[in-house]
Image (cartoon, rainbow, N blue to C red):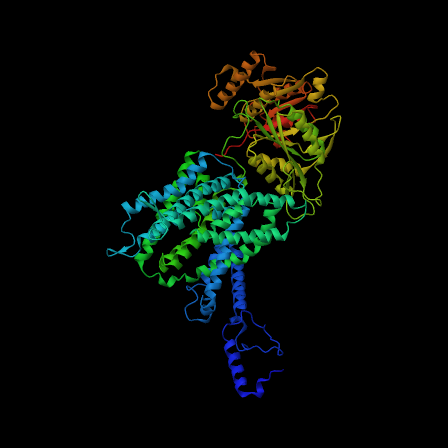
């Protein structure tokens, strides 16, 4: 039966009334488009398309994205980060610029459905930000820096809170009062102090990521200190929340009495749930992540099912954290830390969500949170003065209590200031905390406005200051002594051996054998095969021991390197640890791979092959790479430890250590000692080589007539004599060391001496001593061709001397001053 409402007047009127009601409630979330089809009449056709829910939100997203990108296009050239552009966008769209009852204000205001929708989108954005920051953090890189990180972390936060509280109660108690009447509540003041004294780990990590300082020694120390401070404050806040829950739960049924303490069931359940969730993340969720990686074929992307399942767990962890009366970002952040850093899983998650979260949703969260900023209410000088005093006192106290322990641990003054600026940086965590407190009524509108403007000023000033104070070229420099001279007796010698060509493999292994690896004096060698990146967008670092990056489509061949050094490991089983890497990178960034690997593995020495290669008879140069030379010079300037440049001469008369042992002869090594820190470092390596019975070490100490006649008065010469005295005692003790002193009064006599001994040895070890004035080399620097070899090293490798021996030039770690 066909229904026709026009034939029955009553039904016709009822049908029209129903259409009218349905056309208003509920509103259709999506419009029919700019030009709706006439065949599909829209009962809401008189409503503009931008008043529908989804188009409305999409337009706001578009406005926010365009504005922050516009600001960042200019501000990034001043050294500012993206968060500053987000804040400026939010302030531009806030009540400060868009007054009430204007069309633009009504369009952006949070009325009706928008309040719920904007809050939901903002919460999801904030939650995903914390999850992705946890994924980006490589906790294995944030090695414990010992008492320094603990002292700085605790002093920067807990001690700052304590000192600020004492200052408030003893000096600033009347702050926030007007004519004796309190304007600011006590809780509001304490809340400002707490947030200002905190150092959020994700906020600091995001700052370091954007400034590309996350892999620097300073960045690692800052993140380690932030971890300590965040961990301590998280425990403190969890305990406070738990005690508050116990207090609020006194009147609930089901409470059990233990002595005079009332313990509620619900707070105990929540505390137990938090503990179980942390255990789940560590012992179940993280092993599952490794299981997913294991199930992913080499070179294939991670299945989308796994990624979506992880995101569902992330949302579930936020709901669980909210039920436990904790912040919703705690659960996602813990799960993010549990996801293994880097490819294939961590990179897949970041590739899928990072752009949309950091480029769209996070600016939307900041912009909508900043909507209530209203500079027109800043009319009371008492309000403004009290808030500025609280913020200034907390900043000064935190800055001073971060600088002081860093300075006491021997860090340079500039780096102490840079570290304090990093720890004092404020970002999205603090802004989100203030916004949440404002919505809950904890802080007043004027307080929220002033604090938001302070966060904008803080985020705009600190990044450019950091770029001026902290030199990025020193990002790999270390504060700890990582050289051979200061190693403890019988400790493991860690060496990073770089391979540029397959011709470098055999000489490098022969040199490593000369370091006398044994069970009492083990050697850990990290082999890095460097290859130029061709036809690929992103640099790649492959660990052949862990197989962290492997792809069937990658055009690299490190099989010879891996097999050769694996054989070296087997030959010295129990005495040598070998870990092989391949780095595919652009030539200008290769020094970063070398320095970072040395920093990560706390090596004491980096060995670099020389950029020139000689023919088999040692008479002619067969290859000369300017790129390798520039790379070697960059490593010498930026290295976090000592560096050796190995010039290999493979003439027919030269032998390896194994060949000398087979012929019942000795491998002859000469160490030329002229004095200085680089020569002392080279002598430390020679003393270690002397422990090998197959090697004979000859130490030739050059001394002038004036030095022989006069007693040493300067500290540098006294250190030289002390180390030489130790060598002489080893000679008397029967070690296989030959020591001799040669009187040399000028550079000409030095050249004659080197000519006389040039072909008596298989290997020369010399110090680089760049820029050091000496009577032995005065005038020779004008004829030096390769400054990276130093004057003596350059003379030994020159064709004029006709030396057929290999040369190892040592530069001691350049300690930061």
* Image location of residue 726, percent across then percent down: 53, 17
* Image location of residue 573, percent across then percent down: 64, 25
Residue in the image at 54% along x and 84% along y: 11
* Image location of residue 22, percent across then percent down: 52, 76
Q: Quadrant of residue 778?
A: top right
Q: How many labels does the image show?
A: 0
Tell which of 187 and 253 is nearer to you: 253
Q: Can residue 390 be seen in this view?
A: no
Q: Quadrant of residue 652?
A: top right
Tell which of 207 and 714 is nearer to you: 207
The relative height of residue 744 versus residue 812 in the rendered view (above or below) is above
Residue in the image at 54% along x and 88% along y: 9
Tell which of 337 and 60 is nearer to you: 337
Query: From the viewer's perspective, is 471 left or right of 246?
Result: right
Please, which residue is most extreme toward the left here?
180
The relative height of residue 217 versus residue 106 in the rendered view (above or below) is above
Q: Can residue 451 be seen in this view?
A: yes
* Image location of residue 546, percent across then percent down: 63, 38
Query: From the viewer's perspective, is 67 left or right of 564?
Result: left
Tell which of 783 and 415 is nearer to you: 415
* Quadrant holding the N terminus: bottom right
Q: In which quarter of the image is residue 799?
A: top right
């Amino acid at each position: 039966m066909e229904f026709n409402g026009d034939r029955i007047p009553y039904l016709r009127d009822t049908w029209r009334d129903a259409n009218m009601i349905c056309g208003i409630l509920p509103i259709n979330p999506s419009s029919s488009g700019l030009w709706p089809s006439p065949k599909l009449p829209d009962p809401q056709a008189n409503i503009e398309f931008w008043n529908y829910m989804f188009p409305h939100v999409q337009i706001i997203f578009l406005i926010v994205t365009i504005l922050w990108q516009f600001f960042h296009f200019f501000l990034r050239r001043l050294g500012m980060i993206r968060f500053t552009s987000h804040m400026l966008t939010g302030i531009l769209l806030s009540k400060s610029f868009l007054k009430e009852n204007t069309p633009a204000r009504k369009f952006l205001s949070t009325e009706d459905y928008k309040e719920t929708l904007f809050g939901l989108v903002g919460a999801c954005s904030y939650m995903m930000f914390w999850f992705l920051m946890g994924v980006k953090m490589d906790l294995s890189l944030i090695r414990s820096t010992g008492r320094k990180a603990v002292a700085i972390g605790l002093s920067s936060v807990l001690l700052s809170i304590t000192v600020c509280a004492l200052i408030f109660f003893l000096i600033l108690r009347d702050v926030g009062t007007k004519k004796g009447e309190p304007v600011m509540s006590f809780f509001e003041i304490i809340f400002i102090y707490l947030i200002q004294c905190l150092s959020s780990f994700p906020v600091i990590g995001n700052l370091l990521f954007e400034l590309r300082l996350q892999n620097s020694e300073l960045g690692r120390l800052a993140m380690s200190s932030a971890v300590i401070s965040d961990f301590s404050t998280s425990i403190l806040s969890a305990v406070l929340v738990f005690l508050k829950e116990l207090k609020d739960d006194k009147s609930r049924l089901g409470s059990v009495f233990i002595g005079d303490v009332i313990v509620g069931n619900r707070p105990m359940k929540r505390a137990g749930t938090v503990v179980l969730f942390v255990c789940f993340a560590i012992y179940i969720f993280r092993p599952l992540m490794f299981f997913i990686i294991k199930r992913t074929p080499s070179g294939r992307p991670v299945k989308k099912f796994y990624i979506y399942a992880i995101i569902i767990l992330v949302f579930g962890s936020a709901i669980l954290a909210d039920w436990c009366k904790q912040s919703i970002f705690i659960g996602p952040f813990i799960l993010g830390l549990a996801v293994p850093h880097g490819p294939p899983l961590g990179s897949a998650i970041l590739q899928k969500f990072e752009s949309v979260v950091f480029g769209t949703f996070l600016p939307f969260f900041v912009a909508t949170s900043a909507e209530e900023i209203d500079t027109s209410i800043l009319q009371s000088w008492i309000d403004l003065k009290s808030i500025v005093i609280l913020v200034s006192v907390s900043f000064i106290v935190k800055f001073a209590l971060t600088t002081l322990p860093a300075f006491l641990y021997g860090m340079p003054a500039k780096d102490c200031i840079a570290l304090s600026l990093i720890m004092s940086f404020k970002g999205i965590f603090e802004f989100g905390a203030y916004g949440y407190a404002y919505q809950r009524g904890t802080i007043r509108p004027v307080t929220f406005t002033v604090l938001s403007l302070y966060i904008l000023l803080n985020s705009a000033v600190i990044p450019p200051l950091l770029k001026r104070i902290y030199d990025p070229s020193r990002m790999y420099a270390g504060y700890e002594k990582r050289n051979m001279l200061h190693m403890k007796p019988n400790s493991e010698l860690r060496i990073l051996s770089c391979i540029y060509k397959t011709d470098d493999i055999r000489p490098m292994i022969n040199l490593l054998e000369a370091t006398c690896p044994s069970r009492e004096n083990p050697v850990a060698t990290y082999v890095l095969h460097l290859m130029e990146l061709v036809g690929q967008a992103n640099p790649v670092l492959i660990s052949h021991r862990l197989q962290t990056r492997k792809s069937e489509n990658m055009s690299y061949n490190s099989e010879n390197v891996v097999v050769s050094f694996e054989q070296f490991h087997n030959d010295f089983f129990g005495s040598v640890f070998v870990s092989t890497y391949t780095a595919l990178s652009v030539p200008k960034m290769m020094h970063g791979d070398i320095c970072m690997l040395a920093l990560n593995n706390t090596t004491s020495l980096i060995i670099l092959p020389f950029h020139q290669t000689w023919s088999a008879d040692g008479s002619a140069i067969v290859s000369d790479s300017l790129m390798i030379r520039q790379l070697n010079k960059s490593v010498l300037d930026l290295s976090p430890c000592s560096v050796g440049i190995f010039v290999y001469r493979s003439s027919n008369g030269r032998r390896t250590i194994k060949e000398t042992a087979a012929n019942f002869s000795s491998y002859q090594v000469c160490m030329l000692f002229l004095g200085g820190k680089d020569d002392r470092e080279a002598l430390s390596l020679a003393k270690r080589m002397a422990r090998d019975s197959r090697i004979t070490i000859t130490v030739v100490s050059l001394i002038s007539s004036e030095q022989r006649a006069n007693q040493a008065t300067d500290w540098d010469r006294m250190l030289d004599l002390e180390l030489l005295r130790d060598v002489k005692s080893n000679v008397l003790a029967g070690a296989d060391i030959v020591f001799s002193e040669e009187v040399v009064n000028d550079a000409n006599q030095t050249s004659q001496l080197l000519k006389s001994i040039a072909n008596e040895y298989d290997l020369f070890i010399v110090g680089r001593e760049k820029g050091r004035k000496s009577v032995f080399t005065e005038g020779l620097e004008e004829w030096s061709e390769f400054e990276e070899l130093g004057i003596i090293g350059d003379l030994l490798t020159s064709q004029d001397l006709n030396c057929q021996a290999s040369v190892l030039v040592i530069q001691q770690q350049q300690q930061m001053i």
